[in-house]
Structures are given as structure tokens and as C-alpha cells.
Image (cartoon, grey):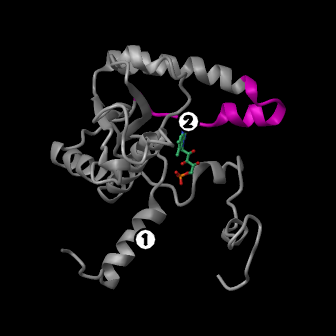
Amino acid sequence: MTSQPFNQNEKDAIYRVIRERRDVRRFKADPIPHETIRRVLAAAMQAPSVGYMQPWNFILIEKKEIRQKVHAAFLKANEEAKAMFPGEKGEKYASLKLEGILDCALNICVTCDRQRFGTVGLGRTHQPEMDLYSTVCAVQNLWLAARCEGVGVGWVSILKPEDLPPILGLPENVVPVAYLCVGYTEQFAAEPELKTAGWNPELVPDELIFWDQWGQKKPQL
Ligand SMILES: Cc1cc2nc3c(=O)[nH]c(=O)nc-3n(C[C@H](O)[C@H](O)[C@H](O)COP(=O)(O)O)c2cc1C
């Protein structure tokens, strides 16, 4: 049993890593020591998962040829994406840096095996998509652990779903959940870059919290 409470320093560290985690898109090429990668992946694999399914795998991608294929898929999807934001928003979109696929030390694709331990799973009988959510929990653990190791992570989702499986040789029952750029960085920005760029504002916590039913507020939180 580990019911030992967290002391104040430990609490501060946990809240700090959560607060200071950033989506990183600018990288240094320095390699990440294997022990660091192992620690970060071990943290990812300690995530909660529906029915203890642990549906994740982590494909560590170093090879330039594979990254170039993924980057080409990004460029294609990004062109289409730009066209979806008309006028000024489109110009702003075009000015954003939204990936670091070729510049970072490592790419990691986090996948979800939709049939791990069989086709029916505890907790997925009525909501089969829970395996995908579990995989996202692993991504968040990875992201936070990397941050406390001084390693930046950037999630690239501007990819057509059909493009990654053939590039990475995924079996039919395995889907890519997150394509991550991972590596050291000059700096972790103080605030989300999309906030600083004025893409979306930061929402006010009080506006997001309801009591008992949608829309009902209480003043005391
Ligand atoms: C599911 C998911 C997909 C994302 N896809 C992209 C992406 O394709 N490109 C990008 O630059 N950032 C991407 N991001 C990062 C978000 O833009 C970023 O998390 C958000 O702006 C808040 O900034 P922060 O992570 O630095 O706090 C993604 C984040 C999530 C959770």
C-alpha cells in the first residue's frame, strides 16, 4: 500500500509540471538519452486504461525517410486545412508553426490496439471508444513526464487518418492516436502559443464549472 501523503514540495512539483507543460514545435536536434526515454515511456504506461486494457504501443521513429513521409502527409493535410479558414483567420493559420517533425530528436506514434485482450472488454461493452480515451491518458502522462525531464513534446494531428497506417506498417486493428514530436528545446513558452498568437482566448474557469446540471452555477468555487 502507498497511502503516504504528498508533502508540499511534491505537490508544488506536480502542479508546476502541469502548469508548465507546453506543446513544443521548435526543437534542438540533441539526442535524448535512452534512460530518459525509458522513464518517460514507463510513466506513459502507468496511465489508467479501461478494463486494464493497456491498449497502447509506442513507435519510436528516428529514420529520416519515415519522417519525411509523415512530413509530406502533414504538408498535404495542412494545405487543405489552410483553405478551411477563410479571410484573416486563414492568414493567421498560415503564419503558425504547427509541427517539428523533421527537426526534433525523435517522433513517437502512440497507437491503440482496439482488440487487445479480445473483442469484448470490461468497460467497453457500451462505449467501445474508451480504449482510445485510455490511450490519450497515456499520451498525457508521457507529455508531463517529458516536461519534468526538460524534454518538449508537440502533438501533430494535421494528418489524414488514412496516411499514417501504411507509412508505419500498422496492423488492421491498430490505430494511430497521437503523432508526437519529441526533443530538447531552447525554451518552454510561458503560455500556450495559440493563446499568445490570438488564435483562441484562454477560457475563464468559473465559466466552465457547473453544479448538478448544465449551466447551473454557484458562486463559492
Ligand atoms: C489532441 C491534440 C491535437 C493537437 N494537434 C496539434 C497540431 O496538429 N499542431 C499543433 O501545433 N499543436 C497541436 N496540439 C497542441 C495544442 O495546440 C496545444 O495543446 C494548445 O494550443 C494549448 O497549448 P499548450 O499545450 O502549450 O498548453 C494538439 C493538442 C492536442 C491535445
Of badges 1 and 2, the one in the foreground is 1
Q: Which residue is mark 1?
A: 15
Which element type, helix, strand or loop, lies under badge 2?
loop
Q: Is residue 2 left or right of residue 208?
A: left
Q: Amino acid at mark 1?
A: Tyr
Do the CB atoms of the residues marked 1 and 2 lie less than 8 Å apart?
A: no
Q: CA distance from mark 1 to mark 2?
A: 26 Å
Q: Where's residue 25, x and y in %?
A: 48, 40
- The residue furthest left is 35
At 33% across and 39% down in the image, what residue appears? Answer: 55
Judge by depth and name the residue closer to the eye, 214 or 190: 214
- Quick check: is the Cβ at mark 2 less than 8 Å away from ligand 1? yes
Q: Amino acid at mark 2?
A: Leu
Q: Quadrant of ligand 1?
A: top right
At 31% across and 76% down in the image, what residue appears? Answer: 10
Q: Where's residue 77, x and y in %?
A: 59, 21
Q: Where's residue 114, x and y in %?
A: 38, 32
At 67% across and 26% down in the image, what residue appears? Answer: 81
**Label 1: few (<14), some (14–19) or many (≥20) C-alpha neighbours in 10 Å:** few
- Quick check: is the Cβ at mark 1 less than 8 Å away from ligand 1? no
Q: Quadrant of the N terminus?
A: bottom left
Q: Where's residue 186, x and y in %?
A: 40, 49
Query: What residue range appears in magenta?
Result: 83-102
Depicted 85 relative to depicted 27: above or below = above
